[in-house]
Amino acid sequence: MKDFLLHCVLFWAMLQRSNMQIPVSATVLNCCEGDILLLLDSSGSVANYEFSRLLLFATELLRPFSLGRGHVRVGLLQVGTNPNLEFGMDVHNNQESLQKALRSVRQLQGDTNTEAALRVAQRLLTETLENVPKILLWLTDGVQPGDVDKPMSELKAQGVSVLAVSTVHGNYQVLQRAVTPPLESHLYSVDIDNIEIITEDMREAIIKIIHAERLRVVDLTSHSAVLQWRPVLSADSGYYELRYNSVWKTDPETRRILPGVSSWAELTNLQPDTTYTASLRPESNQRLFNTLSVNFTTLPDVLSPEVVSVSDSGPRQIRVSWGPLQPARVLRYTVEYGAIPSGHVHTVTLHSQQNSAILTGLEPGTQYLVTVSALYVNGKERAMSVRACTQEAALPGLADLQLIPAERQEVQVVWQARQEGLKGYWLSWERENSHSSSSKPSISSVYLHPTSHSTRLAHLAPSSRVCVSPVYSSGRGDGICCTAGRHTDSNQ
């Protein structure tokens, strides 16, 4: 009983000291959303004074946060011989209720059974379906906490951030292994009489983890932006004041009043490629909320044609496409095309709702310069050019290869073919080998001009095989062959 009275007196005195020396923020931090579970060492190794100071630290640490679902949920789990859940995550939805509950917490005493408490913490933090950041804040003197490495590792593996505050006589090595990096902002070992000096730093570390983008840009163009936020007001509890302006103050600031049920707003008539700053202040006569802000840069002004592409290429035609389609800003499009380097230029005029055209009457295997230009309603023009190549004409086949005997044991080789797309002919034959004792004939070949349709060969080997193949820019095509003396055609 004596210890309990001393505990109450000390805690009351420290609360009075806190109210005098630590200003209580009147602004609710509606910046965050997440779950915070306080794991408070309440065993007999913690002195009554030390326990009270840890509770006071938690009280001041959490005081500015907006509580409840959609904001910050706080639970308190005490470590003793058996773990004791002082209150769960969904119990306190306002600061008055939370502060009253923290002031009424009594120390358990007993053993430091941190392992058992962590099993309860694991269930509390991982069984919830809420997809929000989760924090375990361990407040301890660090004396013989037990084998906590495995449960702490399991918590971290499940996405829980572990932070710790210990008095100077704690086991620092155990704490180092337990907390989530970075250690410099997630682990504090401090003298209990000076614990208030880490309040702001620890709060900032928590905010970085559970910070929620309550004002964000969800759609952006060159002339507009859509802002979205998580509502904190209702239809009858207040309104939102929205202000936005370019950061260089190139245009007057715009101010809009939005009803309390609002959760989004579209900003229009913005300048392209310009950085803006927007602020949203919830106004309510029931509580004071902090102002939310966001910076964004509009997209550059895209003028058609921004992209020109070529497809469906054939020997005599190609399709040219462009974008983006801007019928409200463009009067008409003009497509100009001509063979490179000095072909006749053709022109096609198209209406503003068309963004492709088929160009016909082209030459096979030819490179063209295609220019797409747009005439805008304000009189300005924009053009973009690309190079396009038509395909080679269909490969012409050879026909009617003949070997006609001529004088002096020569043979006249004659064939027929279409010259379109041809670069020449490749002629090969078997020739008598008069300079070698070998009876095996040698192979001879010659390249002929595309205008050639015949040539004369001499010294053919008996029953020599003569072949003619067409040559294109892409390589040698299929040819036909004949055997001397037989005058019969066969495919190669």
Image (cartoon, rainbow, N blue to C red):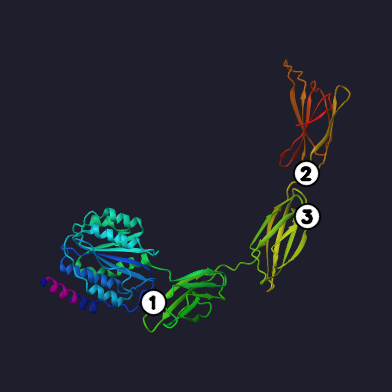
In this rendering, position of residue 111 left or right of residue 309: left
Q: Amino acid at mark 2?
A: Gly
Can residue 184 be seen here?
no
**Residue 250, placed above or below residue 342:** below
Circle 1 packing at 10 Å, graded few (<14), some (14-19), many (20+), is some
Q: Which residue is mark 3?
A: 343
Percent x, y of residue 147:
23, 53
Q: Please, what secondary structure does the residue beneath circle 1 have?
A: loop
Q: Are marks 2 and 1 in contact (CB under 8 Å)?
A: no
Q: CA distance from mark 2 to mark 1?
A: 76 Å
Q: Earlier in the sequence, mark 2 or mark 3?
A: 3
Circle 2 packing at 10 Å, graded few (<14), some (14-19), many (20+), is some
Q: Quadrant of residue 118?
A: bottom left
Which quadrant, please, contains the C terminus?
A: top right
- Looking at the rendering, the stretch of residues picked out in magenta corresponds to 3-12
Q: Quadrant of residue 294?
A: bottom left
Percent x, y of residue 117:
25, 60
Q: Please, what secondary structure does the residue beneath circle 2 have?
A: loop
In this rendering, position of residue 196 left or right of residue 299: left
Q: Which residue is mark 2?
A: 421
Of residue 49 and residue 4, the one placed in the foreground of this image is 4
Q: Which mark is residue 183?
A: none
Of residue 447 and residue 299, the one placed in the foreground of this image is 299
Can residue 142 be seen here?
yes
Q: Residue at x 79, y 39 (%)?
A: 397
